[in-house]
Structure formats: C-alpha cells, structure tokens
Image (tube, rainbow, N blue to C red):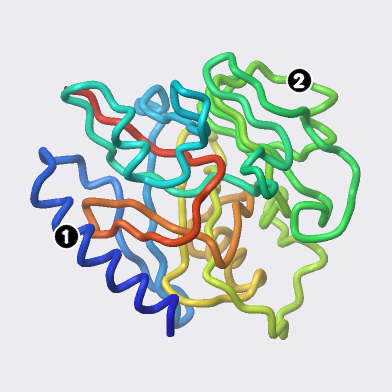
C-alpha cells in the first residue's frame, strides 16, 4: 500500500514536472509483457554522450534523489530520464565499481557472496568503450579492463549471451518492483527498464530477452527501484539513493 501511494504521488509530481520543464524527447514508453507492465527508456548510440552517472554533489555530499540531480544541471539542461544505477552500502557508497568521467569509486568485485549482488555471474554496465553500450560479466571485465566513460557494477546479470541466469526459478515467490538495463545485440541500443508491479527475477529477465531482444542484461536493484521520466509523468520518490544514471538533454 505504501509503495503504491508513493508511485501515485510520484506520477502526480511527475505530471507537474513535465508541465514546467522544456519539452524533452520521448525517451520513455510503457509496454506490456506476459500480463505485466514495464516503463522502458531507450538510448541509442548517437545519444550515448548524453548519459551521465551521479553520486556526489560538488560539496561531496551524496545527492540521493532526482531533485538533487536536477539541481546540478547547467542552465538550459533538462533531465530526460533517470533511475537508480546499482547497489550501495549504508553510507551510499557503491557496492562495486563506479566510474564517471574519470572519477572511480571502488574496484570491480569478482568474488561471489550473499545477496543479489553476489549471485554470480554479476556484471558491469559500460558506456563508451569499444562499443556504445555493453553489459560485461564482472570477472571478464576485470581481465579486459575496458576504458568505459561510465561504468556501474551490479548483480546478478539477468541475461547472459541470450540465456537467463541459471539460478532464476520460474516458480519463485520472491517478487519486487525491479529495475535493470539491457543492451542490444549490436551494442548500439540500451534499454533502461523498471517494472510497474512486483515481478520475479525470471519474469523480469524474460522481458529483457523475449520482450526486448536483449542478449545481455543487468539487474540494478529491487524494492527501492525508482524512475524519473517526464515523458511518462513520473517522478518516483522514496528512500535516498546511491548511484543514479540518467540522460541529459542540452539547451
């Protein structure tokens, strides 16, 4: 009930935001798959340079929400969409690798462990290395060390070379609102997705593979998952966030 009230309030606030901001490209849309709804924000290769990754503000304090991210933008810039971009510790520090415009926080974690992050294989979403977008398995990332402009590590991987994560159960009763990112086979398109309702890992991964055709996809988080998307009238709110990824339109 609380989550639904937050979602509805976010929709209302998002509608107000959409009316007060300059027009943004129709980056996001809603889709249905196997009876569940998903919001999908699509970024093509030509717009990879518009993607940004945020954690701290100029004062070194964690931004924590979409309003604080918008406050960091230069005059004339518009936040086209944004969502939480990976798991974080109690002090909001990223659990794994975080790299944004030459600033790196933490190292890539290759060991398995408890929780969703440690459910190997996990992976790294990489922007701007040898391809516009990649989802790279973490141990391979550590070996190859690609020069990503942006990189965020999370886990588990949802889809690995066209196969669902082997530990996902079709009849699982673990359901959460979840968000993640998938990459097309030619690595020229990235899809940022959040479910409209609680879904299982298996259902969420099937949407990436079978609904979007993504051969590789990465889980970003669940239950705290939130989306800012003026095109959809959404400005979800809740607990403070660690890493946030989004697309910024210029003047």
Compared to 183, does 167 lie above or below?
A: below
Quickly name the residue at label 1.
15
Left or right: 59, with 81 as reference point:
right
Image-quadrant location for residue 23: top left
Kindly identify which residue carries mark 2.
145
Total of numbered circles in the picture?
Answer: 2
SS for dot 1 = helix
From the viewer's perspective, is 58 left or right of 248? Answer: right
Q: Quadrant of residue 11?
A: bottom left
Give me the C-alpha separation between circle 2 and circle 1: 42 Å
In the image shown, does 181 or 245 lie closer to the viewer?
245
Most foreground residue, 184 or 7: 7
Can you tell which mark lies on residue 23? none
Quarter of the image that includes the C terminus: top left
Q: Quadrant of the N terminus?
A: bottom left
Residue depicted at x 72% and y 85%? 171
Residue 160 horizontal/vertical position (percent):
72, 51
Quick check: 104 left or right of 229?
Answer: right
Numbered disc in front, either 2 or 1: 1
What residue appears at the point 42 percent right and 71 percent down from the top-left corner? Answer: 196
What residue is at 29 percent from the left and 52 percent from the top? 229
Q: Residues within 10 Å of mark 2 (few under 14, many from 20)?
A: few
Residue shown at the point (55%, 40%) measured from the top left: 243
**Upstream in the sequence, badge 2 or badge 1?**
1
How far from the left and from the top, in percent, is residue 19?
9, 51
**In this orientation, which residue lies closer to the viewer: 85 or 130?**
85
- Helix, strand or loop at label 2? It is loop
Q: Position of residue 121 (x, y in %)?
A: 81, 50
Image coordinates for residue 164, horizontal then vertical, percent: 71, 62
Residues at discs 2 and 1 in contact (Cβ within 8 Å)? no
At label 1, counting other C-alpha atoms closer than 10 Å, the crowd grade (few under 14, some 14-19, many 20 or more) is some
């Amino acid at each position: 009930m609380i989550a639904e009230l937050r979602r509805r309030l976010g929709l209302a606030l998002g509608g107000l935001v959409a009316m007060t901001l300059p027009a943004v490209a129709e980056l996001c849309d809603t889709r249905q798959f196997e009876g569940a709804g998903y919001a999908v924000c699509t970024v093509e290769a030509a717009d990879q340079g518009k993607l940004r990754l945020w954690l701290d503000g100029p004062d070194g304090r964690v931004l924590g929400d979409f309003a604080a991210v918008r406050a960091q933008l230069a005059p004339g810039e518009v936040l086209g969409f944004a969502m939480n971009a990976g798991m974080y510790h109690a002090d909001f520090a990223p659990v794994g690798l975080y790299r944004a415009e030459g600033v790196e926080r933490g190292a890539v974690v290759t060991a398995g462990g408890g929780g969703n992050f440690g459910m190997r294989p996990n992976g790294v979403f990489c922007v701007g290395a040898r391809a516009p977008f990649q989802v790279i398995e973490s141990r391979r990332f550590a070996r190859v060390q690609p020069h990503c402009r942006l990189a965020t590590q999370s886990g588990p991987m949802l889809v690995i070379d066209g196969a669902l994560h082997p530990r996902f159960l079709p009849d699982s009763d673990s359901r959460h609102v979840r968000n993640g990112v998938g990459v097309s086979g030619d690595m020229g398109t990235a899809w940022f997705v959040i479910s409209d309702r609680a879904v299982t890992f298996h259902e969420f991964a099937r949407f990436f593979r079978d609904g979007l055709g993504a051969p590789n996809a990465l889980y970003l988080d669940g239950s705290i998952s939130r989306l800012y998307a003026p095109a959809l009238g959404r400005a979800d709110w809740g607990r403070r966030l660690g890493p946030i990824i989004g697309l910024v339109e210029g003047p």
